[in-house]
Amino acid sequence: MSVLGAAGDGAGSTGAMAPMGLAAVPLPRGRRGAELVMLAFSIGVVLFAYASVGLGLNGKVPTGLATYGVLFAVLMLAAHLAIRRLAPWADPLLLPLAALLNGLGLVMIYRLQESGRGGNPGNAISTMSASTTTFQLVWSAIGVLAFVAVLVVVREPRMLQRYTYTLGVIGLVLLALPALLPNSVSEVPGTGAKIQVALGGFSIQPEEFAKLALAVFFAGYLVTKRKVLSLAGRHVLGIALPRARDMGPVLIAWGASLLVLIFESDVGTSALFFGMFLIMLYIATQRTSWLLIGATLFVAGAYAASKLFSHVGVRFAIWLHPFKYANVFCGSASVHTVCVPSYQLAQGMYGLGFGGIFGTGLGHGQPYLTPLVQSDFIITAFGEELGLTGLMALLLIYGLIVQRGLRAAVAVRDPFAKLLAGGLAFVIALQVFVIVGGVTQLIPLTGITTPFLSQGGSSLVASWMLIALLMRISDTARRPAPQPIQEEGMTQVVRGG
Amino acid sequence: MNHALRRVSLACLVMFLLLLANTNYVQGFEAGKLASDPGNGRTFSQQYQYQRGSIITADNQTIAESKHIPGIYSYQRYYPAGQTYAPVTGFDTPYSKTGIEQAEDKLLAGTDPRLAVRNLIDLVTGKPRKGAAVQLTINSVAQKAAYDALKATGLPSGAVAIQPSTGAILALASYPSFNPNKLATLNGTQLNKADKKYLNSPQQPLLNRAINETFPPGSTFKIVTSSTAFSTGKYTPDTPYYAPTNLSLPGTTHQLINYDNLPCGSGGKVPLIYAFTVSCNTVFGGLGMHLGGSALRHQANAFGMNRPLRIPLPVSPSSYPPVSNPDFTAYSAIGQYNDTVTPLQEAMFAAAIANHGTLMRPYLVQKVIAPNLNALVTTQPTVLHHTVSPAVAAQVSRMMADVVAQPYGTAHDIVADLGGITVAAKTGTAQNGVNNTGLDDAVFTCFAPVGNPEIAVGVVVKGGGLGADASAPVAVQIIKAYMHYLNTSAKR
């Protein structure tokens, strides 16, 4: 109503007190103007944060403010213009939120890279170089390009459905690739996790893209099988169990996630994929029993793994007693820093505690004390320098992205798109939950990237592609039908279906 | 499917609520515990995020301040005249503190509860927290004179000057000293290097000889013996006393002798004031035996011995242990046996006499000034002991004046003409080592001017030989500098 009223005010300046009912039904709007205003706000926040880092570190506004600021603003405005042309009805909130996260990530990476310069050369982060931020900015550009490319290629969500099995195979290959490659190529130094493909100082984490491909595959597969999968079998304790013969897909997904756990030492990815599959299965069938079966399988698998594989068991021990070994020497041997397992988690927690409610301010904390703070632990750097206040704001940004994604899922009519949007939105929530929960000691820590914030190109590009898919689906959902019904009437649109 | 999606949406909400609740718990409730955990390297550098209060002398010279530096540590401690004031200021490293830096740490750091309201106002107004400044009783002129004079001796030594009427410590110097700036570095490697160097140095530069090393008082203890005697009412400075060249000690084959085996007077009886002025051991040894160990100990306690003291730096107690045998009593009465004193105690001997027998509690901190320039704490002088009656003090004072004034006095030649400033003093030469084979320590206690005492000084120079030779010039330098300061500042 308010939108309608506002439109009426603008148009009704000629006719005094035109009754609303008599006014022509206004055309639904894509709200691109609102998007631009919010985007400008996001860019402003990012530039302010960037200046704040320089002021905090050495009392001067960074010299690169104009260059980097303009580059970042141009990049985001380009994305905005692309949306105007390619997805004019898409949700106006997603781009500003993504831009804000991407920008703050860049600022924090710049801040971490700079902590070794000037007054405290001893505090350089050995895993970062003077060009890390530039690289990350280049990756942001590639991310925005990928974002536009997805919008160009995927004109309709339904068109992805045609490539269900192709993408399924691609996803599995991407997922399995690091496990099949030799350790020298696929192991992330110092972590033991085989999750990357590194060639000549340049590395890609294929799992980030596997996530998208498999989401499409799950959506396409489950849409066709959902009728069968939702058939009820026996009732146990009031819950309708699925038929035993339909257990196949769940067991396969479970097996695949366990293989990832075992051969790539990557608990986080494993949990992420299985969780995404389960939720999509649930959305497709609406059967709670699938969730219970899946959760039981996962817990059983994880428990067995913790007993069988030391690296999983250690994670639990660290989670329960992070400060038991915290003070043990963390020294450097040969190339990489060797630390006791809980050192990183303890340092991250110390950083959070040190930041307190308001934080130290950008550039005033010592996030570099936490090993690899620029990737998995970047959220603790935010918590230290922006405090609880900043951390809650970041969580709310993620929450809003998830909420807008789910809203698109609810609004869109096509079941495939609905399932895909639901799965993608949930996977963001799950990823944030796993990593933020991990570094804040809520759940056992598993190393996965923080969407948009962590240093690293693959995650950033994949996150932008994910946002593009959500925007495409939201564009489809909000696009006025041939005979316009009502502006913004997302829930009303589905009245026929 | 929308029904399921709404449920998923609820699940996402729950996940985010869990994250929010947990971060609130970690950063809101656990924050203090995490921040103060000994494993948290961030905490120790936090103390360098705020400007620590300065330490200033009574005449407003800054001797320790925090300077703004670029980088993660916002402030670094700087000591403008490091070595001179090191025994007073101490040092402030990321790991440990000494001296005033330690004793007044909470006020300097601004964490003292008395500054809480101030901090709260600063938090609200957005001003950074600042520590309170500590103003000492130290007079920069006297302190500089003391350190320079000790340094000139080139020997391990300590000197303390006190204002007798208040107990305010005017100078507190120790040599060899250290440079606290070397320890105030925030570079771990440099700090380690400096720390090792000082700790391993055989000269023990970190040892505060003014208050934390004890020496035998030697003949300066005769002030205590005389005070004990006069307090009985049976003796005056003019009382003749038996003065043998050798004093046979009962129950032993030992004989107490005078310095260099010299006779005392003509071999008969001499007035106590003469024995004091030329420092006869045989007279005071005999007098001590007669008075008894417990009377001497009681009087020594009244001079502040045998008890720990905080000024607020911890002072090693000077000691006059219980003596049972008369022969040991004879030795202890002339400052040998197991008697030990700090240079501060030496100054307290003179200060008590100078202040008409009332010993004021020595103190270093004059006041603490909050960042808003309000005085937070102001030290009021307090009495430590009523050591002797004014009459007795006047008698001892008369004898001490003779030590300098009489041509035959042990300090007459060394304490040169101070331009009208009269000095009352007692020298001491403490014998050391097995069978006194070690180098003698030069001990000196004095106050000036005799009529209206402004300053009492105690000096010990280890291995300085005859008392007056090495330590008296140090005291003279301090008195000269301080009296000059008083005269010029009075004219201003």
Image (cartoon, helix red, strand yellow):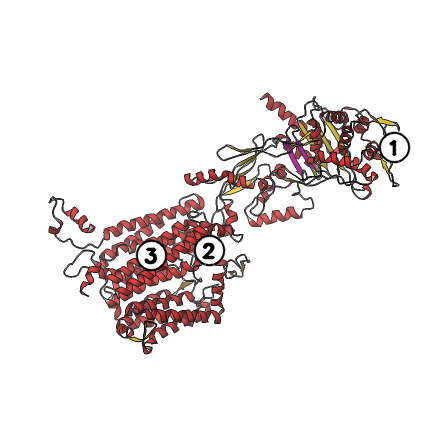
Tag 2 subunit? A
Image mark count? 3
Quarter of the figure with the C terminus of chain A: bottom left
What segment carries the magenta color?
B158-179
Position above or below: A444 against B87: below
Residue A445: where, in percent of width, then height? 44, 62
Tag shown at residue B452:
none
The residues bearing labels 1 and 3 have C-alpha atoms spaced at a distance of 100 Å
> Mark 2 or mark 3, which is nearer the start of the sequence?
2
Q: Which residue carries the number 3 mark?
A: A399
Tag shown at residue A348:
2
| Residue B241 visible in the snapshot | yes
Residue A262: where, in percent of width, then height? 44, 71
Looking at the image, which is closer to me, B427 or A68?
B427
Residue A411 colored magenta? Answer: no
The kind of secondary structure element at disc 1 is loop
Q: Which residue carries the number 1 mark?
A: B245
Q: Are marks 3 and 2 in contact (CB under 8 Å)?
A: no
Amino acid of disc 1: Thr
Tag 3 subunit? A
> Quarter-wise, where is residue B294 in the image?
top right
The kind of secondary structure element at disc 2 is helix
Amino acid of disc 2: Gly
Q: Is residue B366 left or right of residue A294?
A: right
Amino acid of disc 3: Gly
Residue B78: where, in percent of width, then height? 55, 40
The kind of secondary structure element at disc 3 is helix
